[in-house]
Image (cartoon, coloured by chain):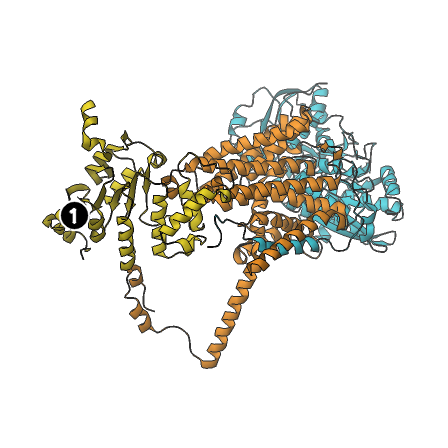
Amino acid sequence: MAARRRDPAHAGRILSTRALTRHFGGVHAVSDVDLDVGTGERVSVIGPNGAGKSTLFNLVAGEFRPSGGRVEMFGADMTRASIQQRAHRGLARTFQTSKLFTSMTVADNLYLALCGRPGSVRRLRDARRDHERIGRARGLAERAGLGAEFGVEVGELSHGQQRQLELAMALAAQPALLMLDEPAAGLSPSERGQLTTVLRELSAGVTLLLIEHDMDIALVIGERVVVMSDGAKVLEGSPSEIRSSELVRRIYLGGTLDVR
Amino acid sequence: MTKRISLSARRLGAVPLALALGLAACGQTDDGGGGMGQPELDGGDQAEADTEAEGDELVIGRISALEGAFAAGAEDGERGVQMALEEFGHEVAGRPIRTIVESSDTTPETVVERARKLVEQDGVDIIHGPLSGSEGVALADYAKTVPHVTFVDAASGGTETTLRDPAENYFRWHSDGAMWTAPMGPYAVEELGYDRVVTLAEDYSFPHSQVGGFLNGYCAAGGEVAETFWVPLGESDYSSVIASIPEDIDAIYVALGGSDAVDFLSQAINFGIDKPIIGGSILVEETVLSSEGQIRDAALGTVASGVVPPPAADVAGWQDFVSRYQEMFPNGFDNPSHFAALYYNGFKALLLALEEVNGVVEEDDGEALRAAMSDLQWDSPIGPLALNENRQAEGDVFIYEVVEGDDGGLTTELRDVGEDIPQPEVVWERLDGCPAP
Amino acid sequence: MTWARANVRILVAILIVIALVAFPFVVPRPQFWVVSVGIRSLWLGIVALSLIWLSRYTGMLSLGQMTFWAVAGYGVAIMSTQNGVPYSISIPVAIALATVVGALVGLIAVRTQGVYFLMLTLATSQLAFYLVLNAASVTRGYVGIGNIDRPEFLGLSMSDRNVFYFVALALAAAVSALAWYATRTPFGLALQGIRDSPERMRALGYNVYLHRVAAFTFASFIAAVSGALALFYHGRITPGAIDLIRSIDVLIVSVLGGIHSLAGAFIGALGLTTLQNFAQEGYIQVRRITLTGVVFVAVLLFFRGGIVDLPNQLREYRRSASRQWARFRSRKHDGRTDRPSGADVSDSAGGADGRDRQQLPR
């Protein structure tokens, strides 16, 4: 115990999974994955379709219960913690397909993102008088390039704008750990470039776990890259190591065609 | 950059419409003075509502249960009213009669709303209705708040309506559910020799009063009750009830109705009932006897009592009524139902009283009409009728037996007549044995 | 332009307030119009408000609102007629009781969604119906509890129809304002968030379940207010007032008025009340329930937004009619169809998204 606490690598760790496993019926979607993310680190998880990336993501986010193994986050065992508990401790996530409040305005979406954690929110006062949070929401919208759309219903935004909002909402609560689930999915090349810029400019305090099908973004953003195939972690290394790896090339060529 | 946390307030386009509706509701203005403290929400301005009846025309409001479970019965009731109107050529003392029919759905709330509409909006001074028991109780309550309106019951059978603090302006020309079974009690002991029975009925107000009326006379005549069985309305499986019927009884008294009656009768033989069945007023009525169920063996020989005589009964005026009904309504039932007879009686009594006062209704707030109605005695198709001090008819009740008709089908035959059955003195609730004397 | 529109709104709002306040003094036959139309529309509107609020802001369509209406109505009736409890105590206690029942039902009901939620809430109201029917020793079964005296306060008696009308109007305004305010709070915004995406709300740290229970409880409170009010309107309460038809009536009111708008509750209630009162006059030979059903279907098919949305809807229809007309005319003139040729479609279908590629050339 005492020895572990002094271990600097462990002390700085914000997320670690041990032997994390999940099967659906006979299919092992994720098997025996050990994953460590240090505070402030940016880690990308890549792999072809069906490699188990999304399942791993959902196990960490709390959407799925693991069949075996452990999830530790923020220095505590969170294997059985609810989604809300994880969120309250500082986890934020995006969804692969946008899950926004489409009949509400950008302002309302961001405002709700700011009020998720318990604390100072007075739930029964008029939200329009909450100038402090409205101001913060406006700031978030402007940073996401949505300043002009602040009062617009989200359903009327373009796909790219919705992805921006998605990210802004995840960042709203100033999470300790930000998990992005294929943020580039469905974006145009120029939007991808924009996204890359935004992600690179994230403040240093944010720890990032990125799941991405698009190798370019994953390798540019990730300081460390984890490669998954058939539910298992097969390789881990720096972007340059991954880029030159014969194994990765084989997996991707053998999997689906996404190498550009 | 328009609104901040923006929500729903974008539907204000609705308001002009609301306004239009509201104003359409207004029309011309009128006094509209404040109210006063009567039980019904009141404003003390009923006289103004009388404008609707134009010239000589006499408008009668009618409320019938044309929706819901009794719709078929109510339709037949309408035929009874038609017959009465035909008889009078649709006019009384030179005044043509117009009826406004409002439909209720057998709930007390609706019947009062319909009545209020007839009185306040249409300005009627006479209301004929309703069909069912709890409607009648509510309507008699309402009657007390509009003393200038005369109410004539159509077919409702609740005992309470004319018993507890009866309204001065509410008249009922037929007996209630407890009276319909009253003569059956002594008859079962004295004529049939059944000294010990069990009773079986649905657990709600009408069967409560039927069983109460029966047991009251039965126990007074020396009969014993082994047990009373109560089943929920709509019970379809009688096997467990039948299995727990004790052996040492002479007969089973059954006050079920409608599909419950059919279900019971068709199961009775299969589950081994070998005791005679005697019954309430709707156990073996027309609709049950003509049903498709296998009820023949159980139904044959059943003795029951009711306010409407068997089709072939030799009751003064009844045969005329039956043949006139058949003539006028080839598409009606084979024989006039309970409802046709009762609606006819109530409406005809009203027309007779109107004739008596020469059609004077509005001028004296119906005083003379009500006085004439209270004193009226007449020979209805089901026997002579007169009202007691509660303005409740006390007439004859018929005891009949199910027999095989000429065409091989089931019909009923008159066995006895209970004459001038008096109004009960209590409202019968659910009984678990002989009522306390 | 926005200024003008804001002014029109204010003007309309003022006109409505004037119309509502003047209503009892200008209608002919006030005994009928104020009582049977005015007051009835108000209490019926309040129950419908509880349904609409819940449906609009949480996405839960409940057919169980009459349950809480019944608990409040029977609660006051039983306490005050059988145990002599004064109204000043029995009314708040009965409304609180109905709200607690609402919370308990909510604990179970909000776990289900869509048609299951609909069925469960409908079953709840049916359960209440059979319960009062069978608990005859306290509810008096079919006959119900009658002869309810109307409350008096500050020297005013609710037996006076104008006093009753303004009490009902004030209550309707108060619960509407409360319901509207609730939607502006972080709590109300969270409900709308949950309606749009419960997964996202969970990921943001919200307790979706408790929010739903709280919303359901709040809606039952509104229904309970209506129940207490309607008890004094009828002067009695019987199982007939809470049977299946009444639950359906509340739904019809909501759809008729406009299920997407709180104001729709009262407009729909006025609409249904008018329909029920005048639909059976001699010149309309259709039974009340049948006609109500026909109107309901017509609204669902052609006027989804209900009466509230009628102006928009008609504008929409007019626009599409004129479009059709223009197309018809142009077709008649040059005898061509405006369908794109097959080549156009297949050329443009080579785009980025796989879904486009699956589109069949016409």
In-image side of A211 versus B391 (left or right): left
Pick the residue in front: B198 or A185: A185
Q: Can residue A229 be seen in this view?
A: no
Question: Where is B70 relative to A187, above or below?
Answer: above
Which residue, given by chain and number where applicable, does mark 1 sit on? A239
Q: How many marks?
A: 1
Q: What residue type is labelled 1?
A: Pro
Q: Chain B is drawn in which colour?
A: cyan
Pick the residue in front: A179 or B234: A179
Q: Is residue C10 visible?
A: yes
Q: Which residue lies furthest to the left in this view?
A: A246
- Give coordinates of residue B25: x percent, y percent: 71, 53
In-image side of B319 versus C217 (left or right): right
Question: Where is B238 relative to A220, above or below?
Answer: above
Q: Colour of chain A?
A: yellow
Question: Where is B25 relative to B374, above or below?
Answer: below
Quarter holding the C terminus of chain C?
A: bottom left
- The residue at the point 16 percent across, 48 percent down is A239
Pick the residue in front: A226 or B328: A226
- Give coordinates of residue B150: x percent, y percent: 81, 42
Q: Residues within 10 Å of mark 1 (few under 14, many from 20)?
A: many
- Give coordinates of residue B280: x percent, y percent: 66, 32
Quarter holding the N terminus of chain C?
A: bottom right
In-image side of B146 versus B228 (left or right): right
Q: Colour of chain C?
A: orange
User: What chain does badge 1 belong to?
Assistant: A
Task: Tell me the SS state at disc 1.
Answer: helix
- The residue at the point 56 percent across, 23 percent down is B245
- The residue at the point 89 percent across, 42 percent down is B368
- Give coordinates of residue C324: x percent, y percent: 50, 70
- The residue at the point 20 percent across, 23 percent down is A2
